[in-house]
Amino acid sequence: MSTEAPIIDWHKLAKDAGGYSPQVFEFVRDGLQHAAEMSANSRQGEIIEDESRHVSGQDLCLGLRDLAIRRYGPLARTVLGHWNVQNTDDFGKVVFALIDIGILRKTDDDRPEDFVGVYDFDEAFAEAELI
């Protein structure tokens, strides 16, 4: 019995998910880690009964915005656009494509609608473009 991880065709996955660049999948995975750390930092001192590192769709979108600005500065919006990511809905499509192939997990409460209209890209990245 083989325990090798399945080989993922990132280009096909990106195309099937909505015509995204394969780079966005790694970015979203990095963003999930970043959002979990942001959430943990904001909850310091609280008693946390559930030690899962679950991040809501809204929190993930906020973490992805922060990570994009940290990594790409004033080019954050341009980089996301190059990857064909135009709004937070696109982040949701990428996340659920990763869930569908077993890379990410979701709770019963997680839905694609959690990513719809979290923020307007033009407004969210306008400040970074002034840097």
Image: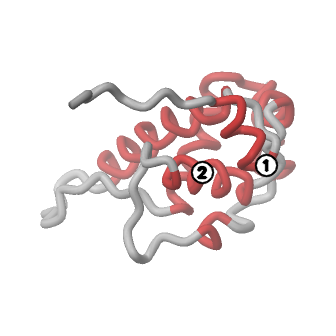
- Total labels: the figure holds 2
Of 4 and 25, the residue lying toward us: 4
Left or right position of 83 against 57: right
Quarter of the view holding residue 84: top right
Three-letter amino acid code of the residue under disc 1 = Gly
Image position of 3 with respect to 108: above or below: above
The residue lying at 37 percent from left, 68 percent from top is: 107
Query: Which residue is most to the bottom?
Result: 109
Left or right position of 52 against 121: left
Q: Position of residue 129 (x, y in %)?
A: 83, 31
Label 2 crowding class (10 Å Cα cut-off): few <14, some 14-19, many 20+? some
Image position of 35 with respect to 118: above or below: above
Q: Residue 18 has which mark?
A: 1
Q: Residue 65 has which mark?
A: none
The residue lying at 61 percent from left, 29 percent from top is: 9
Q: Which residue is mark 2?
A: 97
Q: Position of residue 55 (x, y in %)?
A: 41, 57
SS at badge 2: helix
The residue lying at 71 percent from left, 35 percent from top is: 12
Image position of 87 with respect to 47: above or below: above
Three-letter amino acid code of the residue under disc 2 = Ala
Of 117 and 104, the residue lying toward us: 104
Quarter of the rendering occupied by the N terminus = top left
Image position of 63 with respect to 76: above or below: below
SS at badge 1: helix
Left or right position of 39 against 10: left
Task: Tell me which numbered mark, 2 or 1, is placed earlier along the sequence.
Answer: 1
